[in-house]
Amino acid sequence: MLNWHGAATAVVTPFKNDLSVDYDALSNIIEHLITHKTDYLVALGTTGEVATLSAEEKQKIVRHFVRKVDGRVPIVVGIGGNNTAAIIADLKTFDLSGISAVLSVSPYYNKPNQAGIVNHYTQVAEASPLPIIIYNVPGRTGSNMTACTQLEIAKLPNVIATKEASGDMQQIMEILAHKPANFEVISGDDALTFPMMCLGAAGVISVVNHAIPSTFNEMVHLCNQNNFTKAREIHKKILALCGAIFEDGSPGGIKEILNEMNLCSTICRPPLHPVNEELAGRLRRLI
């Protein structure tokens, strides 16, 4: 079983002016993150604007990750959606060589009940050749996976972790208190990573990590070393940035910072759009 204790980055998909994928920029971002000790990378996540990528682009992006990373850190690939049968088909046909795990978001838009969510993940886990990290993000999916539901899914032999982005600390504490020993809780919220790790979370799949990987990774690693006093000082320092990058949509905020760092353009695929000028200036000051 791979060790998911640490700081990961949900990597953006950079685009050129014609909205095609900018693979040179993607290479530079991957190298930037690995150089600054990011523990693993997530491709085709929400931050990667996966909803606007074609099936061909998804495959090409993942193969690019595998070639560029070259075994230096684990890679997780996002394969999820609101059509259980389609996800199972993707898991059977997607080239997952060189990939360590699958991140699969709870079904969105359909708003299934809790029994439906358990059934969905049971089928997905059975079909997946790789370990599954479930992903609870009610702000995007329109439905919450309760603590009871996540703990039920945690019993599945192929499910290794949850990326928890509900923002509900009571729910998160319940999962941490009752989870199986081989099931990890991973923060899906940059601003809550420190308090979640104080309570026993393994780490984070981060967005702000793009901008301040050395600093953010140090906070996460200090927490895993039980040095919460020093980690808390970093948490205080980065809190404003963690909030600001999401104020006017994501990944518009982090792409503004990456553009300031000469790593990629601010371009997002519609319907997403770069952040407003006031926030852009504030992000540049914060970074």
Image (tube, rainbow, N blue to C red):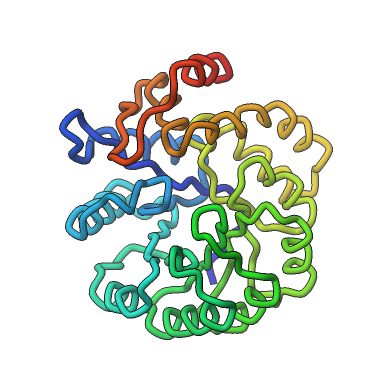
Q: Quadrant of residue 80?
A: bottom left
Residue 179 in view here: yes
- Determine the residue positioned at 37% across, 46% down: 48
Quarter of the figure with residue 206: top right
Observer-nearest of 259 and 130: 259
Quadrant of the image occupied by residue 97: bottom left
Compared across the picture, whether 286 is left or right of 254 comes to right
Frontmost residue, 124 versus 205: 124
**Relative to the observer, which residue lies in front, 235 or 54?**
54
Residue 168 location (% of width, % of height): 71, 56
Q: Kindly identify the residue that appears in the image at 66 percent across and 57 percent down.
A: 202
- Residue at image point 75% right, 55% down: 169
Quarter that holds the N terminus: bottom right
Residue 284 at x, y = what percent? Answer: 50, 16
Quarter that holds the C terminus: top right
The residue drawn where x is 73% and y is 52% is 196
Figure disc tally: 0
In the image, is residue 234 above or below residue 113?
above
Q: Is residue 235 above or below residue 70?
A: above
- Whether residue 101 appears in this view of the structure is no
The correct choice, above or below, for 64 with respect to 182 in the image is: above
Is 187 left, or right, of 78 in this rendering?
right
The residue lying furthest to the right in this view is: 229
